[in-house]
Image (cartoon, grey):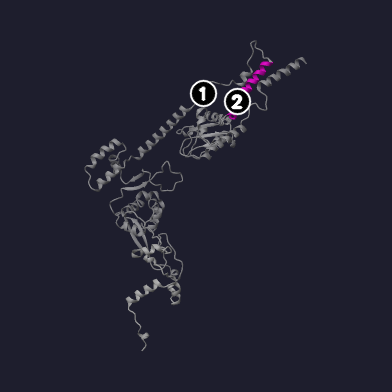
Amino acid sequence: MSTHEFYFVPRKLAKSREKLTSETKTPIESVSSGSSAELYKTSGPTPATCRGPGKKDADNADDAEVPYRPKQKEKERFLDDSAYMSLLELALSEYALWSDPELLERMDVNGEGFVPLSYVTHRAPVLASLTPMPPESILMRCIKSSLFLEARMIVIEPYRDSWFGGQGSRDVSGSSDQGGFEGEFDVQRDDSHTAMPLIQSITFPPHRDDAPDAPRPIKSKGFAFLVLAQMKIVDHLLQRWPWDLAVRLENNVLKDVEKKGVEAAAAYDAREFGFHCLSKKKWEALKRDYISLQRRLLEKTIAASQPEPSSFSRMPVEETARSPTLNGKYTKAQNKSTITMQKDSVQPLVYQAQNLSFPSGCLVFIKNVHPETNKTTLRTLFTSALDGMADAIDYVDYNKGLDNCYLRLAAPSYARTLVKYFSSREVTQENALDSAGVPQSKRGVSMPIEVELIQGRKEEMYWAKVPENIKKQAIAKAQTHAKPEYEGSAMPGENRCEDRRRHKRQKHG
């Protein structure tokens, strides 16, 4: 019997022998031995020897490759169950159902009052803004611990097509019917319980720095509107945490002595972060006072920066042309000098933009416009006051939320026309998109639009903030639109002199 038939190697010795041969074999020897799996092994240390006793040898081997290990996905952090439970109760509160008729209609479809849980999470603003969105298993656990909500699970039999490779469909609840029985979670309000959620709704109003098209719901900026279930709770909060700081500190010191445990910790946090509240009625009154104070301060600032009226006043052309001599007769030389004086007095007022770094007399300040209007509406409104001349307004300098703006006009004559138009009539904007204006008598509440011509130091300060290229374009436009008042036509004095000369020629002729 040949010895090869009883060839046997113990397991431990085989492992040590395999390890020894794997470290000493070269790629060529591995191929010759017929083991294609060892073709990629090298005679140097393996990646596994880069730690522990073989670290010194691994440092000497520059070509040793470290195996790539994919980075594990970080675990998503979810809120506490109590937070999700409060959000679910807010999403199905009386106020939420009143403000969202579609959600209320969806609950009354089958008459049982249940609604798919996924529909609530995508419909309610307090839940739709959560990132990351918790799975339905966590929400179901929170619903079971709530006193105001009730949940059920409906088992849905899959369609027959799904058993033969058909594409599974997905319903609004987020459950799939691909292979096997699937469950759908429904939730409803449990009105049988005598208790009622104290907080019906929490709304975060937009901040002054938020854009008008900011996504909803807006993140908290430190203040919010609360809708409470009972009036006595409102009175308790207003008395416990009043808006007045002195009264609030006195109440906190007296009340916190009686509190212990969690209630005392919550009161401490509220006092630490300056928690205080006021009613909606008082909030609206403070808002009106704030807007009135803002308007008064703005008017005071404008009045303080407005220059004093100039002592120079141009004489009317008609009165200057009819100034008589000592003997009460007109002379030809005097008429010529009068006409020259009139031309000299008119020209600087028309072409004064040529000698300055900005177009003087082309800036007006508008007050009492609608705070929610826009530049397009304002341009249309003031263009109609200029007989529809679209190129008369160069730029509308307006920021949304304010009741005033600046208008840069193409020529000083347009600015004077606009001031004269709104000085002779009281016009106001009926709404934010009112581009025609209505008489102020029909409104009776809002102030009429006022137009003020800006000159002097205030005008210089405004144009100092405008870029140079914009100022050059405004100067060029003012020079194009501004024409002498009597250019291309005879002066009034010239017409009367020509009539007298023609009368003398006919008399002596």
Residue 15 versus residue 360 in the image, above or below: below
Of the pair 213 and 430, the residue shown nearer to us: 213
The answer to whether 470 appears left or right of 447 in the picture is right
Task: Give the mark toward the camera: 1 or 2.
Answer: 2
Image disc number at residue 246? none
Residue 160 versus residue 416 in the image, above or below: below
Residue type at mark 2 is Pro
Q: Secondary structure at mark 1?
A: loop
Check disc 2 and report the residue beneath it.
348
**Residue 475, quarter of picture:** top right
**Residue 252, quarter of picture:** top left
Q: Is residue 351 magenta?
A: yes
Mark 1 vs mark 2, CA separation in Å: 18 Å
Q: Main secondary structure of the magenta part?
A: helix
The answer to whether 299 appears left or right of 187 in the picture is right
Check disc 1 and report the residue beneath it.
309
Q: Secondary structure at mark 2?
A: helix
Q: Which residues are magenta?
A: 332-355
Of the pair 96 and 220, the residue shown nearer to us: 220
Query: Which residue corresponds to the image point at 28% horizontal and 39% vertical from the top-left?
Result: 239
Residue 123 versus residue 26 in the image, above or below: above
